[in-house]
Amino acid sequence: MLDSPGAVLYSSATTLEKGPIYLLGLNPGGNESSTLQDSIDASRAGHNAYLDEQWSPGGHLQPKGQATLQRRVQKLCQSMGFNTRDVPASNLVFTRSTRLQMHLDYDLALRLCMPVHEIFLRSIQPRFVMTFGSLVNFSSSFRLENLETKLAEHGNWKANRGNIDFDGRKISFGNVPHMSLWASDKRQDVVNWAIAGLEKTNRL
């Protein structure tokens, strides 16, 4: 997969150490031609895709870190009390597609990527996993427990929270709709509800 378009990490490789949080989207979007190997090299050089890249949503090139999803991820990290550069960030699937439905074989790619996520989780040992995108994809990848659901103030879209059972550990879990489409920066009350599990672990 190393020569396939996409990204393994959106954060620096230095974030793969013990810490409180792991951030996950679904898979890289856009039309960039950089490969998984390129992204590994960039992460080793301290690169953060949400801060240091220029994205072109809809074909319109934006300044570094200023595309809508980049800004919303930055705001989400701030809401959780972290500097975006310090948050280990990835996607369930590393290979790129302009839309999830257009991915050539998402299920196969997910099976290939999950062992890497397990390595990352064992390295980070997070207290909280924050996700954005359809819960169906995360629930097929992780053992989710004690789920609660809240309308996300956008049609029938929902936010979710609960726990992940991983390696005999209970990790708090939060989920909101995909922030490329869902205006998380205008629905702070929903974001606060989804990240309440992190706040709870901070009090323990």
Image: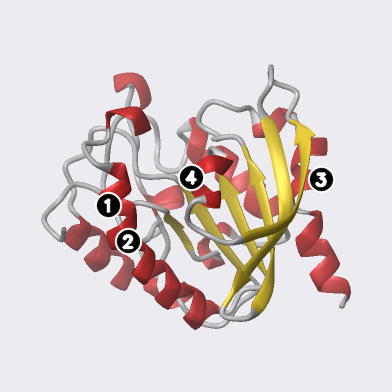
Question: Circle 1 — which element?
Answer: helix
Q: Residue furthest left?
A: 3
Q: Quadrant of the N terminus?
A: bottom left
- Percent x, y of residue 168: 63, 81
Name the residue at 54% across, 37% down.
Answer: 134
Label 4 vs label 2: CA separation? 13 Å
Numbered tag placed on residue 13 in the rendering: none
> Is 114 placed above or below 190 here?
below
Q: Measured from the top left, where is residue 131 in percent x and y?
A: 58, 50
N-terminal label among 3 and 1: 1
Question: Label 4: which residue?
Answer: 137
The quarter holding residue 102 reads top left
Q: Earlier in the sequence, mark 3 or mark 2?
A: 2
For the residue marked with disc 2, what is the amino acid?
A: Cys
Q: Residues within 10 Å of mark 2 (few under 14, many from 20)?
A: some
Residue 163 relative to residue 143: left or right: right
Question: How far apart are the two marked residues, 3 and 2, measured between alpha carbons?
Answer: 29 Å
Residue 49 visible in rendering: yes
Q: Earlier in the sequence, mark 1 or mark 4?
A: 1
The type of residue carrying mark 3 is Trp
Structural distance between the alpha carbons of marks 3 and 1: 31 Å
Q: How is the image coloured?
A: secondary structure
Crowd class of label 4 (few under 14; some 14 to 19; many from 20; radius 10 Å): some
The residue under label 2 is 113
Determine contact: label 2, label 1, CB under 8 Å. yes
The numbered mark at residue 193 is: 3
Read off the residue under disc 1: 109
Q: CA distance from mark 2 to mark 1?
A: 6 Å
SS class of the residue under badge 3?
helix
Q: Are marks 4 and 2 in contact (CB under 8 Å)?
A: no
